[in-house]
Image: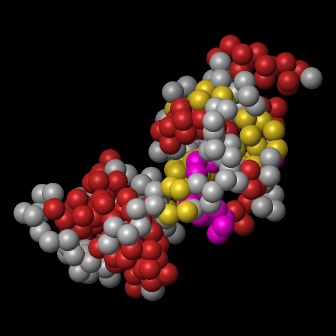
Amino acid sequence: MLGVILATLLTSSLGCVSVEEAHERAKAAAVGNYCQCTDTCHGKPSNYAGYRCDCSGLVSYAWKLGKPGLVTSEMPAYCDKVGWDDLRTGDAILNPAEHVEFFQMWIDKKAGIFHTSACHDVAEGCNTKRQHKSYFEANFYPCRPKANVVCRSENETPANATVRNVHPATYIAKLWKEAASAGFNGAQVTNCHDAVAVALAESGGGCQAKNVNSGGSIDRGLWQINNYWHKEVSDSCAYDCHCNAKAAYKISNKGADWHQWATFTSGAYKSHLEVAIKACKEELVEEVLV
């Protein structure tokens, strides 16, 4: 009962946040360091706008709950369990005893692929990345923030409706074409389909995607540009979609040489070629994803 009372006091004083604002706040907070509540943060920033830099701190910031944020075990007082098929932007994916992530959007609902924003551990930090439902199903459940936490519009599209969304490949193709033409003396757009397929295989289309390798180097952004091998590409550039595209265009010799990308050398990119070819031909303006 005390938890319910505290939840009511916290949310009523701050007011509910819109789905759109929660979405943007989660993305903004999901770039940077991770700090466990009980440690000294190893000299790294211990908070983001007054909220802890850990998983429940990020969701608390997105939902505009009280500072410095809840701990994961307190999250159930602020949200209600829903089914996986009803998962929508603004919801949480929760295991109260372990971890919580902010659900951003479905990439391919039938395939169970989506984007979340979260703080993971000290090594990986906080990021927005592509995830698969199978990773969460056994121990997590979707949790929808209560109406006094996140305000949902009556006109919001149901999660199980057929919605037409811009496919990530379309946006990536656009970025690649801009990189080929801007600042490169009007160079002809080359190898667009390979570029798009590699980006999809590397990051799932996530501009804030981050992967920490076993040796400690970090693959960053849309084309997962490594911070050790390409120190000339700053973090601010790597996590900016347009700048990342320009860097990938240069590193790949205008799309002619992808040997530095593991998903190309392994052939993993090939599974994305069909959709990439359509995107580059501008035949994939919209795609039914859900």
Q: Relative to residue 34, is residue 87 drawn left or right?
A: right
Q: Relative to residue 82, is residue 248 drawn left or right?
A: left
**Residue 70's image quarter?**
top right
Residue 216, horizontal then vertical, whole percent: 46, 63
- Give the residue drawn at x 81%, y 62%: 138
Residue extending furthest toward the left: 185
Look at the image and name its color scheme.
secondary structure
Residue 270, horizontal then vertical, whole percent: 45, 83
Residue 145, horizontal then vertical, whole percent: 73, 35
- Give the residue drawn at x 19%, y 65%: 180
Image: magenta residue range: 97-113
Residue 209 within the magenta-colored segment of the rendering:
no
Q: Is residue 128 above or below residue 54?
A: below
Looking at the rendered image, the quarter that the C terminus falls into is: bottom right
* Magenta region, main secondary structure: strand
Instruction: Judge by depth and name the residue closer to the eye, 172 or 34.
Output: 172
Quick check: can you spot residue 228? Answer: no
